Amino acid sequence: MGKKRTKIYLQDWLAFHPYSHPKQCDYYYLKLCNEILGTLEEHPVLQLHFNLSDVELRNLACFISGYFEDVISGPGLWKSFITQVMELYGTYLPFFEPDPEEYFPDEINLEDIHFLFWYYISMVRYDEANVGPHLFEVTTLSEDIFEILEREYEEAPENERLKEVYAPPPGKDDFDALIDTIRWIMLDSWLLHFGGIELDEMLGYELAEEGEEPLTDDAREVYESDMADTYVMSSYTPLMARQGKDWLAYLLGKEHRLFDSLRWMGEKKSGFYLYLGQEGDVRLFRHIASETVLRVVDFESMPGDSIAGESMYYGGFVKWRGKWYLLGSLIILESGYASTAAEKEHLDVRARHLFRDRQADLGGKLEKMHQIFLKYNSGKALVFVESLKKAGEFIREFLLYYNESLDLPESVKEEENELVMELELDRGPFTDTNSDSGESIPGMVFFNPDSGFETAFGYNELIPDPDNLWYIESDSGAGRLLYSQYISGRWMHYLAEHYELPGLSLPGEGGEETMEKNFDFILRFRKREHYYFGLASKF
């Protein structure tokens, strides 16, 4: 007897939508999902190469159907993706480089299906290995799926509910409504639903570490909600290394009145806050560690026992269009715990810097610092050191040199020195990646003109530089650099431009050339937020 066919049910399909009650069109797309699932199950390439589970196959069928519904009802998430690709790389898609004369950005395309298979498999096998994209060009899988979609293209119904999400009416600038849309995009949308899976795994891991005193049901609910909000507002997607606010901005379109303000929306600032009172419709909170005062709008009400100047809360706020909004719940702290939390907050470097904008504080200094660094380091942006301690000594010595190089009065130099020392040393960038002690592992210091100093330890053996005493010749291994959270995208570009890095390739024929042509896209996909700054370089 052959394997029993699996089936996709309505609740499976609705899980990828911003509503729970089906529309008439959902029954059409559910039927399409199951037809696509049948084709996937019959095709040997998925099992032969990737051994997808039944759940992964069902989700893949929903994923492809979601793309089709998105194009029919859009412009939607797919259009926002190819718009970003075109903006960065001058082509509609990575890897497959469709002919712009034959590619139709508002319709379905065979190259889209090639890419979607690569993307989906790469996500469900994200922690295992890179996937070669051209495998899907040399099998009939994409063509078989495309034939189904092409047959249905003229008759497929638009999803009016999705169209409302994709194009909110003028004047609908409600912060909470926008956050709800961002939450759906990041956790449940067909294109980025992998974030919801990742968040569930993170919550499971965190809650498994509760210890001897597990959380109450109410505390657990608040904790899960706070962690979800932080993930939604602060995490970066593998696709394009962008945040949820960016995806919503591109979903609405570059001509939309909210595009720029969404791109500039801040991350959630979670911490301990003292309630200061009320001024009209504004509530005042002071962040304990940094003493930053927030004027919070759209605040419904404070708990009845709140006392201005005394009540302390744990909560998170987001800045948008010059105003602060509460995101999630406020958790009041009992007086005994509040004093202890306040003491710990003042000692926490990251907490003290929560509201600090390094780019604003440093102003135009980074580019000047970069030029002086190149002069100081014989024209190189990279230096090799024997230990964590030596890295700190090198950076401190350079900062003193930089300060002395400035044509400023001595009093101004002293202020400048204090600022730069605090920004580059007090933030604690010297975290060893591979050791508890970090004292004996060789490392590298890189000056990133976009973000300042970055450090990484345990990778020197991979870099063939005459000044690198720890290099070990090998024909592989450079892939570790690609996966490292400590080496930013800018740093990786520097390494690839200045050194031969054996092993920097994708699977399959022409993998090295494919990697080279799509290097920045792959860096974004692998490094996410660390594309912009190495892990040891972020507050």
Image (cartoon, rainbow, N blue to C red):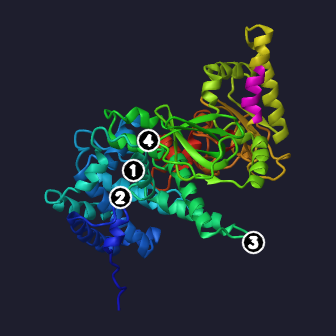
Q: Nearer the viewer, residue 14 or 46?
A: 14
- Farthest-out residue, left: 155
Dot 4, crowdedness within 10 Å: few (<14), some or many (≥20)? many
- Mark 4 belongs to which amino acid? Asp
Name which residue lies at 34% across and 49% down.
77
- Mark 2 belongs to which amino acid? Pro
Task: Decide whether residue 89 is among the magenta residues.
Answer: no
Dot 1, crowdedness within 10 Å: few (<14), some or many (≥20)? some
Assign the C terminus to one quadrant of the image: top right
- Mark 1 belongs to which amino acid? Thr
Tell me the tag on residue 128. none
Name which residue lies at 80% across and 39% down.
469
Image depth: mark 4 or mark 1 in front:
1
Q: CA distance from mark 2 to mark 3?
A: 38 Å
Start-end of magenta stretch: 417-426
Q: Is residue 45 visible to us here? A: no
Q: Is the magenta region chiefly helix, strand or loop?
A: helix
- Judging by the rendered image, the residue that carries numbered circle 2 is 18
The image shows residue 222, relative to residue 82, as above or below, that is: below
Are discs 3 and 1 less than 8 Å apart at CB?
no
Image-based side of 251 in relation to 159, left or right: right
Q: CA distance from mark 4 to mark 1?
A: 12 Å
Dot 3, crowdedness within 10 Å: few (<14), some or many (≥20)? few
- Judging by the rendered image, the residue that carries numbered circle 1 is 181
| Mark closer to the chain start, 1 or 2 | 2
- Judging by the rendered image, the residue that carries numbered circle 3 is 212
- Mark 3 belongs to which amino acid? Glu
Tag 2, which secondary structure? loop
Are discs 1 and 2 less than 8 Å apart at CB?
yes
